[in-house]
Image (cartoon, rainbow, N blue to C red):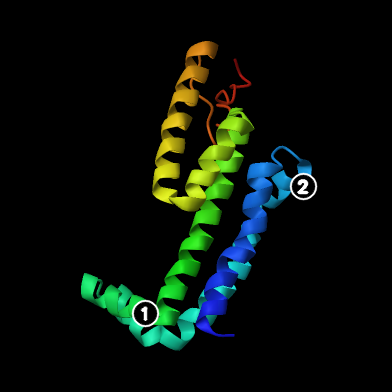
């Protein structure tokens, strides 16, 4: 496969997962797929197919990052394709986290869906808006319940110290 085909394949492999997250939220199989980190593996395979042939240039660009080095890397079809595939994999990984976090916090899919679309297109903007929304929802949840906002991990209960049997 040539670089152009692999470049296009990167998004084509991620698109069905994005479609599930955006168009079929709340289904058990959508939730199961969203919980799996394996969704990014095919895109990472495309990344490897593009990155290995240009590895010396890729390594030079990431080990001593400067604008000129990245411009040289991006001038190569495989270099630009590898960066694209890496971006697609990372965006999908972020999108899956956003989906799961929105479900956990009870954010309605009609709010989450457009944020996921924004994340597909411009992930830094989508993530920032989601983080702001998440903070508001968590703050409101804490204000309504009078307790702390929901946590990602449950806090283990504090146990009482052992009693002295002689007392």
Q: Quadrant of residue 42?
A: bottom right
Residue 45 image point, x, y percent: 58, 74
Check residue 29 in the rendering and tell me which mark sits there, or answer none.
Answer: 2
* Mark 1 neighbour class, 10 Å CA radius: few under 14, some 14 to 19, many 20 or more: many
Left or right: 133 with respect to 109?
A: left
Q: Quadrant of the N terminus?
A: bottom right
Image quadrant in which you'd find residue 125 = top left
Q: Residue at x 63, y 34 (%)?
A: 103
> Please, is residue 89 above or below residue 119 in the view?
below
**Which of the numbered marks, if any, corresponds to residue 66?**
none
Q: Residue furthest right?
A: 28
Residues under labels 2 and 1: Cα distance?
37 Å
Q: Position of residue 5 (x, y in %)?
A: 57, 78
Identify the image quadrant of the C terminus.
top right
Q: Residue at x 51, y 51 (%)?
A: 120
* Mark found first going from the N terminus, 2 or 1: 2
Relative side of 32 to 48, left or right = right
Residue 24: x and y in percent read 71, 42
Give the residue pinned by disc 1: 58
Number of numbered tags placed on the structure image: 2
């Amino acid at each position: 496969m040539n670089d152009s085909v692999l470049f296009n394949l990167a998004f084509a492999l991620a698109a069905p997962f994005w479609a599930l997250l955006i168009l079929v939220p709340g289904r058990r199989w959508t939730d199961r797929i969203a919980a799996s980190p394996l969704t990014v593996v095919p895109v990472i395979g495309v990344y490897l197919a593009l990155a290995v042939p240009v590895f010396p240039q890729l390594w030079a660009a990431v080990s001593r990052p400067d604008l000129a080095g990245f411009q040289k890397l991006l001038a190569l079809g495989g270099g630009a394709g590898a960066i694209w595939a890496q971006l697609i994999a990372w965006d999908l990984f972020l999108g899956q986290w956003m989906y799961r976090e929105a479900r956990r916090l009870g954010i309605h899919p009609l709010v989450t869906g457009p944020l996921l679309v924004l994340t597909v297109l411009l992930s830094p903007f989508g993530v920032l808006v989601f983080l702001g929304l998440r903070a508001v929802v968590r703050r409101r949840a804490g204000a309504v319940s009078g307790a702390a906002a929901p946590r990602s991990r449950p806090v283990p209960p504090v146990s009482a110290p052992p009693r002295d049997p002689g007392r």
